[in-house]
Amino acid sequence: MILATKTRWRWEISVPVPLVPVAAAVLGRTGEVLLWAADNSGSFGTQNRTASAIYNPQTRLGSGKIISETGHNMFCPGLSLDVSGDVMVTGGSTSNHTSIYRSASLSWEAVAGMTVGRGYHAQATLSDGKIFTIGGSWSGGVKEKNGEIFDPQTRAWVPLPGCRVEPLLTADGRGTFAADNHAWLFAWKNGSVFQAGPSTAMNWYDAGGADALGRQAPAFSRGQNNDAMNGNAVMYDANRGKILTLGGAPSYDHSPARSAAYEVTISDPFRTVIVEELEPMYTPRTYANSVVLPTGDVFVNGGASYALQWTDANATWYPELWSAKTRKFTRLARMTVPRTYHSVAVLLPDATVLTGGGGLCWEPCEEIPQWEIESDHFDVQVFLPPYLFKTDGKTFATRPRIVGELKKEVKLGDRLMVRTYMDVTQFDMVRYGSSTHSINTDQRRVVLKSLPRERSGELGWSYDVKIPSDPGVVVPGYWMLFATSSKGVPSVAKTLLLHV
């Protein structure tokens, strides 16, 4: 069911799920969404288990399961999708554990733990298939938590003392415990990593190149005194190294949110970056989630105008859409369910956005002054972006369709012959995403070069589409291939597994 509105975007009715989804990962093999909370479905404690669920966007059904076989409480973890599309979860409440969800066998596997216990850290899948992480003093003790890397060949973690965490700390008054959290990490060329925030200082890291110990170098400052903890950073145009950053707050909690937005442009690793301040959002927000759409626009959902955990009292009710063309924000339809701290948002293959969660506190929740039971949201909800509608706001737009079969696995640098049933003007890819604590290091968008080959009203249109060759730009793994019409309407995606 869709909620009626006069605008060119809509919310579907929210759907109950058996937990508060604090984390989400879209599975490339099936298009289903893996959700999980903590050791309990609506609160977190100290048990080494995880309440999880699989949500099917087609049937709108979610099936729950308690994961105990890995002995891992995967609350507040590091999270990324590896090059085979499996979900790698590190640390969190069980601070040094590593668990991988094998989507082919629908099973969890425990692998070697990190060398340092971590929680509230970020991680990213790199161009060479390794997994990099840094920070995370919320769990595992407060200390200097420099980078380390997981090698899928040796199935072991290796410390990188040269990837120093100190340069990315924010000025949070609680010190390192809160200052090394949720780094905005972007895998880039030649095994490098760019850290775009949330600290004002941005940094380059060499996590897989010539220096076996790792290396860090300052990149540039994103602004003056502009720490943006729990803000968002989205690579909306990886071809040109374009990153949109927005929102956040100076401190993790008890802090006013920011509305500032910046465009950060990176080129070759360890080169100085370009920063441009953009027009701000309509509403200051922290704890929000941002999702890159096939068009390059960025959907900004939820958050709070004042950083205070486990409450909807300061919820921002109106999402915004940032246009990659005008580089301005538009306010969208009012949300029906607030999404603040511990909420998620991810792009689905049908070019809609799945949102969910918010709430979930430690047990007993009654000890938290601002907590109210209504702020625990056991549901997900789909947002239908403006491009799916005609100008009357009621009628669905005609969508292009990619017809026929494509190769399921494609090597970077290869060409594809793609056939559509109507003329299209552009092909784009978006990497399958994951989301927790306002961080999604997996999603990024790539514009593809294409040439028309045949145009036939009966047989459809066919195009020669080139996949970029650099795994730092097109990180291997599962990607969604979209065809977009001249009116800016994207198709339902075809899924490709890209490899070197």
Image (cartoon, rainbow, N blue to C red):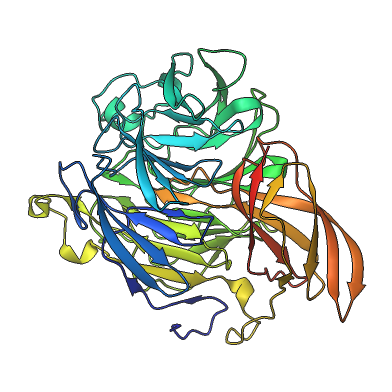
Please tell me which residue is depicted at 72% across the width and 60% down the height of the picture: 406
| 64 left or right, relative to 487 | left
Q: Can residue 53 be seen in the rendering of this structure? A: yes
Quarter the C terminus occupies: top right
| 437 left or right, relative to 400 | left
Q: Say above or below: 188 vs 209.
A: below
Q: How many marks?
A: 0
Q: Say above or below: 178 vs 331.
A: above
Q: Nearer the viewer, residue 89 or 84?
A: 84
Pinpoint residue 347: horizontal percent, then vertical percent.
Answer: 52, 60
Q: Nearer the viewer, residue 465 or 351?
A: 465
Pinpoint residue 450: horizontal percent, then vertical percent.
Answer: 83, 56
Single out the residue that lies furthest toward the front: 105
Q: Nearer the viewer, residue 279 or 91?
A: 91
| 157 left or right, relative to 37 | right
Q: Quadrant of residue 266?
A: top right
Quarter the N terminus occupies: bottom left
Q: Quadrant of residue 429?
A: bottom right
Q: Say above or below: 73 vs 40.
A: above
Pinpoint residue 214: horizontal percent, then vertical percent.
Answer: 52, 16
Q: Can residue 286 be seen in the rendering of this structure? A: no
Pinpoint residue 468: horizontal percent, then vertical percent.
Answer: 75, 43
Please tell me which residue is depicted at 48% across the width and 70% down the height of the picture: 383
Please tell me which residue is depicted at 40% across the width and 70% down the height of the picture: 381
